[in-house]
Amino acid sequence: MTTEALIIAIVIFTLSTFLGVELIGRVPPTLHTPLMSGANAVSGITIVGALIIAGSDLGWISTYFGFIAIVLAMMNVAGGYAVTDRMLGMFKSAPKEKR
Amino acid sequence: MPGWLNQILYLVSAVLFIIGLKRLGSPATARQGNAISGVGMLIAILVTLVDHTVVSYGVIAAGMVVGTALGLWQAYAVKMTAMPQMVALLNGFGGGASMVVGAAEFYRVFESGANIPTPTGVVMQLSLIIGAVTLTGSLVAFAKLQELMSGKPITFPAQNASNLLVFLATLALAGWQVSTEVPLILPFYGVCVMGLVLGVLLVIPIGGADMPVVISLLNSYSGIAAGMTGFVINNEVLIIAGALVGSSGIILSRIMCKAMNRSLANVLFGAFGATAGATGATSSAGLTVKSIAPEDFAVQLAYARKVIIVPGYGMAVAQAQHQVRELADLIEKRGGVVKYAIHPVAGRMPGHMNVLLAEANIPYDRLYAMDDINSEFDDADACLVIGANDVVNPAARHDKGSPIFGMPIINADHAKMTVVMKRSMAAGFAGIENELFYAPRTWMLFGDAKQSLQKLITEVKQA
């Protein structure tokens, strides 16, 4: 990684953090648990790194590490999205006629 | 697939994450938002799989099948009361995955005999350290929440000093690796091991009641770790997604701290026991509580126009949510309005109580955050406190000697009549007397919450 690439990456990271603060600051307390598990699933994006490592045929150590990383990240992704969906499915609003 | 197309598709996936998070801002669109975010993840995975650097698929297929199966099994088997543990565990896996990717990248360079340029070195060390801390810290949090280990803070002399020492040693090893630029095995292992130890050390002194803050923070770390991995493998979607998650955790831990009137530093480094010993100036000596029979309270509830229910974690422990809903339905059928007042720390993680109530089919538009409903207690005919204690203690407003002084509380004492359901007169988590129990308009309804609610239901039906 060159210094320029690092700077660009830092810029992206910083701006995304501010974007995240804006987006998440608007989530009502009622949804904080699904927000957390949903965000958790998003952090499973590290699966991309795991796939590259495991699939690139770089020797057995990298492949082995890659396998572990895929299992961990995939549990995070699959488990995170599924449980968030399961929770959000429970949130129902009151029937309209009851006021 | 040409490189630029890859980049564009990664950008699409990042945009879908952002739209997904935005849609999580309202209960009506949240489920759709989660699905949109999931599509973003699917795109990122597919793009990576057809990437030209990926040449062997056997290990990938095996890893994905195992990970998906375990993840889905966990997601559908978990009880809603156990959500904090599940999120803690998932945080740990995310951090662990980031750490392992960092480690694998180190090995790749090590075996190729190349050097690690300083910028790469810095981010690689960060991904290892943050990933390792997230992994073991989350496992300890999981063990505490699952009650595999005591929820009490584990402390020893000079704890903060020795933690600082471990932290500095980790940084020194990382600095050594970065400055030599030649990949070295010793500092690599050193950093990994020290990072793992640091994660354990940081979480063991934190009590079970503070775990909402800790898992929020670890959530943030798992995002930052993914972001750092993005720096290492130079992938923008990891950086963007990691930063989004990182900020979400920071916001949630700040909200939790505010709700407990404590600073993040105090939660992390000041084991709570220090102040809990000095019980408040309030003494129960000479004060008596009034108790009420279910049949008497049922009459009040049957004719109440506005009832506010204050649920606490004790209600979830007693598994009484469904009885609560049944009672609320009866009151509403008789023309009353039932609302729920939810303190931010009512459950074991941010928003936990809302999920528990939603599971019992209580409509989300009846659930009110503390700040939104506190002004409504004055015209509430009855307030029913179930399994909550410290969050309704008026001492937090005026008693400077109380450990919870300054904590924002729910105005349960402002209602025309307040009934507290409680097993016995034992003190709450902080071990302090609750002034509310002795207030002139408060009555105690002793017994198991589920059974008491059942009696109320029967009586209201007959009223």
Image: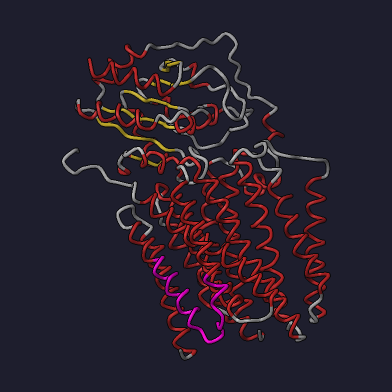
Image position, residue B125 (x, y; %): 72, 70
Closer to the camera in the image, B144 or B279: B144
**Magenta span main SS:** helix
Image position, residue A49 (x, y; %): 58, 74
The answer to which quarter of the image holds residue B429 is top right
Does the magenta run of residues contain A42?
Answer: no
Does the magenta run of residues contain B51?
Answer: yes
The answer to which quarter of the image holds residue B284 is top right
Find the residue positioned furthest to the left: A97
Is B245 left, or right, of B276 in this rendering?
A: left
Q: Is residue B383 visible?
A: yes
Number of marks present in the image shown: 0
The quadrant of the picture occupied by the C terminus of chain B is top left
Q: Which residues are magenta?
A: B37-61
In the displayed structure, would residue B285 be above or below residue B58?
Answer: above
Is B243 left, or right, of A87 in this rendering?
A: right
Image position, residue B364 (x, y; %): 32, 44
Closer to the camera in the image, B268 or B20: B20
Residue drawn at x 45%, y 76% is B46
